[in-house]
Structures are given as C-alpha cells and as structure tokens.
Amino acid sequence: MSIEIYFFEPRTFMPLSRKAKEAIKVALAMTIAYGIALQMNWDKPYWAGFAVAFVSLATVGQSFNKAANRMFGTLVATVVALTVIGLFPQDRWLFMLILSGWVGFCTYMMGGTKYQYFWNLSGFASIVICVSAGMDSANAFRIAILRSQETGLGILVYSLVAILLWPTRSRGDFDAAAVKLSETQRQLYQASLEQMGNKDKTDATQELRTHLLQVQTRFGQLLEAAETDSYEVWEMRQQWQKFQRLSTDFAGTMAGWHGNFIELQLLDVKSLIPNLETFSAELDKRFAEVERMLAGKPPEQQPAPIDLTLNKTGIQSMSHFHRAALAVTRKRLNHLETLSRSLFETVNDIQGFDQKAKVPVAKPQPSGGFVFDPDRLTGVFHVMTILWLAYLAVIYVPDIPGGGALVSMAGVFGMILAGTPQLPVSKMFMPVAGSVLFGGVIHIFVMPQLSSFYELGLLLFATIFGICYLFAAPQQALSKVFGMALFIKVAGITNQQTYSFLGVATTAMLFMIIFLLLTIIVNIPFSARPEKVFLRLLGRYFRSCGYLIHNMHRDTQKQEKRFDRWQKNYHKHQLASLPKKLGVWARFIDTKVLPGTEPPQIQTVLTGLQALSYRMQESLAESDKAQSPFLLQELQSNIKAWRDRVEEILQRLTDEFDAGKKETLGARLTEIIDRLEQRIEETLDKAAENQLSKQDNENFYQLLGAYRGVSEALVDYAGTTEIINWNLWREERF
C-alpha cells in the first residue's frame, strides 16, 4: 500500500518564476520565525533569523541537510561552550586557549569532504555562546539554551514552509543528473575509441572529460540531497553510492587510457587485438543499457562475457616498450569491461528490473589512514590568529567598537576565509558595507515609523524578498547571505525596541577593524595572491613527485617503518589532490598583470599536470606489485639511471617551474629509454627457459609501460611550461 502526500500549491493569476517562489518562501519563514520569537519574548530573536537565512537552499533535501547540520552543530557547540566555561571560569588565558583550539579543530575538519557546515557551526556557535556569556556560568547556560531554542525555531519554520509551499524536490533533478552522467560516460568512451590509433582525428576527449567531472560533482551534490527527501533513494543509498564510486573510477581510467594514445597511434591496434571491435561494441551496448535503465526502461539484453585476444605473432616483432604499451592498454580495457559490467548490475539492482541478479554492495576500501593537509592547517592558523588578535584587542584597547562582538564576528569571517581561501578580502567588503548601510537606513529612518508587528512583518517580508530575489544566482550566494544576516543584525529587532545612530556607526567600525585584521592575516606567513599560491602548490606537487620516484622499489624484505609509511601516504595524497586545488586557484588568477599569459595556457598546464598525476599513480601501483628479482637485479642500474634523470627534472620543476626545452628533454629521456630497451633484450636472451613466468613478463611489461608513461607525460608537460613566463609570476607586486 502506498501513501500519497499532497502539498499546498497556491493558485496564482500569473505564473511565478523559480527565484520568486524561493524568495517568497525565505521571506515568509523569516517573518513567521520573528513573529513567534517576539511573541515568546525571547531575547535576541535575530538568532532565529540567522537560522532561516543560512538554512535556505534550492531543494528540500539540501535544506534538510543544512538544517540538520546547523541544529547538531549548535547542540555540539552548546555542550563545548558550557564545558569550557565551567572548567575555566577564572582563567581567561586558558579559557581562550582551549576555545581557540576547538575552533581551530573545527576549521580543519570543515575543510574535509563531508559535514563542512556542521563543523562550521560547531566552531562559530561555540564562540558566540562563550563570548556572549562572558565568565558568568549562570548566564552562559541561559544563553546556550536560548541559542538552541531560537536556532531550532528557525530551522523548524523554514523546513515546514519549504515542505508545504512550492516544495522543490531534488529527486527529479537527481534522476536527470544520473542519466546525464551515464550519457556523458558513453560519449567519452565512444570518442576515446575513435581517437585511439587515429592520430589524424582532432582530440575531443579533453572537453568531454572536463564536462564529465562537472556532471559528477553535480550528481554527488544531488545524491546527498535526494537521500534526505526521497525514501526510494534512501533505501537504495548504498547502491547509489556504489554507482558514484564506479563513475569516479571510470573517469580516472579514461584519463589514464587517454595518456596512452600517443604511443598507441604508432601501432596497428586493430591487428594486434583482433576482437577489439566486438569488444568495443559490447561495452558500448552496456553503457547504452545503463543509460536506458536510468531512464526507467528495462534492459533489452544482459552483458555478454567477452575477453580481449592478442595477436601473438604480431607481438613478437614489436619492441619491448611497445609491448609494454599494449599490455597497459589491454589492462585498462579489461578494467573498463569490469566497470561496465558492475555499472550495469548496480543500476539493474537499483531499478529492480531483475531481483534475481541482486548484487551485494561491497564496502569501500579504507584509506591509508589520517593524512594532514597543509592548506587546511594554514586556514587553522589564520582563524586562531584573528581570534587571538580580536581577543587581545578587547582586553587591552579601552572601549573598542563592538566589544565581545568583535571576537564573535572575527571568528565568523575567519572561518569563511578558511573555507574559501581563494576569495579576496576585498570581494567581501562591498556586500558587507552595502548590507550595513541598508540595514542602518531601515533602522534609523523606517522602523521608528512602525507601530505594530503587522507593519514590521510587512517590512521584514518585503526586505528579505528583495534581497533573495536580487541575489538569486548561485555566484551571488555570498551577497545574499550577508545581506540577510547583516540586515537583521543591524536592524536589531526586539520587543523593547530602541533606535540609535551610534549603534549603526559602532557596527560599521566593528567591520572596518575586522577587515583590517583579515587583510593583514591572509598574507601571513605567505602571500595570498592567487599566482603566488599557485606557484607554492606547484612546487609542493613536484616535491611529492620527487619523493615518490626516489623511494620506488625499496627493499621489500625490510619492514616499512610507520613514519615512512605515513610520509608515503602524505605524498600520494598530495599527488592526487593538488591538481584539483590548482584548478580552483587558477580561476582566480588575474592574467592582466601577467603579460604573455592567457587562461587557455594555464588550462593547458593543468591538463598536463593531471596527465602526469595519472601516470605517476599508475607507476606507483605497478611498482608495488611483485616483480621478478632476476629482472630487477639485471636492470637495476638502468632503472636507477632513468629514476635519477626523472628526479633531476622534477627538482628543476620544483625550483624554476620550467623543465627546459621539450626537444632536449625528450632526447635525453629517449636516450635512457633506448638504453633500457637494449638491456631488456640482452637480459631476456640471457634468462633461462623457466626463469621467468608468464605473470613475471606481464607485470614487468606493465611496469615498463608505466615508466614510459611518466617519461612522456613529463616531456608533454615541459612543452606546456615553455609558453609561460614564470619570472613574471615570481615578481612581487604592490
């Protein structure tokens, strides 16, 4: 039996736009929350307004997630604040040390992939409660309870309004995003097949891979929301999460496969893999069936078993490095076969078309343990520094504007800056200044003319509606949030209403001090200019590459120490995460002050860097496999020569960001590769008949393919660095 729930859908004489409906919902929720808080005679009702302002998002599921995070974050902050005040009521230095340490911990956790808003609220709300309560434990408990009550009120009111009035469910958008993701995967697979072995065809895969990344990000956001507001998605959440992991694996596999195209274009792939067309057609059918099932239609056929066959006669005449390239390609294609089958079975299970084929969902593999992030630590340093500076200013500067509010707002803006370090402080100034000015005008000239809550409610509704309607675009979210939050703060709506220009002026002075502190702190210990940060991250990336290359093929007989294992995991994490961070910072680089540098050139550098990351990760994975001791011993000096040369290039990239001329670099690496090719031939001729197994040969060819891939990726990256004048990037600007 199914239960149908009907929602209130108001009739209008003319259709309202999406942003008008969302603005009406936020304005109505704000007005109701204020009305209840004032009726209950609660102190500082703007806390309920803050909850409405920060919780309001595009869909019910996203709003519920943010509401839950805000409520739980506030509860955790309440417990922490009461504990800190109870333990250190008379020691203000230890009190601030523990509080700032907790806020720093929340800031670090806020930089993770999940529960960012929960940690943000846990840190911010603890500052508000502690500073508002001062050192009075009885007052602290009252404020903590009031904070929780009014936050809960704002969350409850907006949640009910969002459910009952024009509910915007994420399920429809989620289903469309899943279909779009599958469609993009199939398009990328088809384009890659056409590109492989066809050097005359224009490469269209780069644009598709970038688009796939965007679609994946969108899908992940909607999945989190749909798990909240859709019972069906919640019931199958493990299968959907598996689908998301498989899609991420697919994107990485396709990027690595694309890196082999240059060497594959020198081979007659179709003759070396006779059933490649049959294999490709089968995989294409599977992707088509996945797309069909996501659209709600049953599959027309099940996956057929298939395996790649090799032309052994043709392989015998190939060089060892060409054999290695073919071995790596075959491995990737087989992995794609496994991925396509898993995607088919997972989606089939989600849609319930074949209950007999229900697939158990394996738990994701655990990560390599905790790995600290230097960039998140920088954010922690900034937040704790501004907190201490504001705290010391309140203690030692008599009558400083804002008083305790200076510490609270310093923590808020410090955590905003830590969450979005690319955001220039100057970009926050205009929204804040405009909001304070607008709120001040309303407070001084309009509110004294009001005589009842009906008039006040109309003012609240109209103002919040106007802010939400004018700043409805996603890129205007900062202006929207600041506009609502600072308006209700400056307006100072309470039951015992007072009006003072001095209060507005004090608030304006408060934010001037905060922006002065932020401007100083963001450039400590390093410059916050995007191009400077880009160079620092680039240098760290190549240092991590150099460390990982240097420590390849360590003696497996020796037990790896815990610190060495931690170092390795740290550098692997940098290798995987830094290209994405560099891509974010690249969007904020002002190329107008860097003559000769254009955004497409920076994008080319990032593309080469991503290709190098995939090749490095592949070589690390292959080096961890068991290799023939005989081959490693015989080729040790040649492998070391290659490794030393690569380390030399990486060191130059770390120091100068320029690897030199692409032709010169390619010639030197080719010379080492040719020498290694010759030694391989001699070693295989010298090997006894049963000294090397088939698995030894396969593992070694895959390792050689990974080495060759790193070499070619470095040469390609060197070509991208030649077009940029890095000296201009290093120059100081004022």
Image: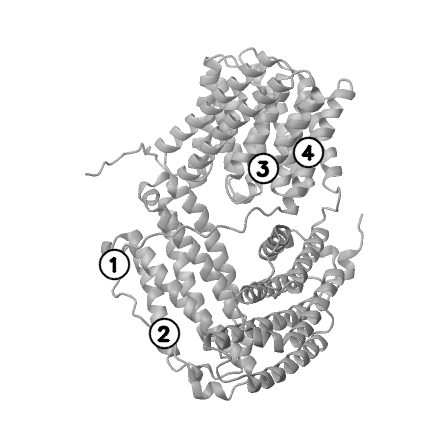
- The residue positioned 48% from the left and 64% from the top of the image is 253
Q: CA distance from mark 4 to mark 2?
A: 58 Å
Left or right of 110 in this view: 452: left
Q: Give the residue at the far left of this rendering.
A: 1
Tell us which disc is closer to us: 4 or 2: 2
Q: In this rendering, is residue 468 above or below 661?
A: above
Q: Amino acid at mark 1?
A: Pro
Q: In this rendering, is residue 486 above or below 320?
A: above
Report which residue position mark 2 lands on: 307
Report which residue position mark 4 lands on: 384
Q: Earlier in the sequence, mark 3 or mark 1?
A: 1
Q: Earlier in the sequence, mark 2 or mark 3?
A: 2
SS assignment at label 2: loop
Nearer to me, 17 or 212: 212
Label 2 Cα crowd, 10 Å radius (few <14 / some 14-19 / many 20+): few
Q: Amino acid at mark 2?
A: Asp
Q: Which mark is residue 479?
A: 3
Q: Residue 231's x, y, as percent? A: 32, 40
Q: Earlier in the sequence, mark 4 or mark 1?
A: 1
Q: CA distance from mark 4 to mark 3?
A: 25 Å
Q: Residue 463's x, y, as percent? A: 52, 28
Label 3 Cα crowd, 10 Å radius (few <14 / some 14-19 / many 20+): many
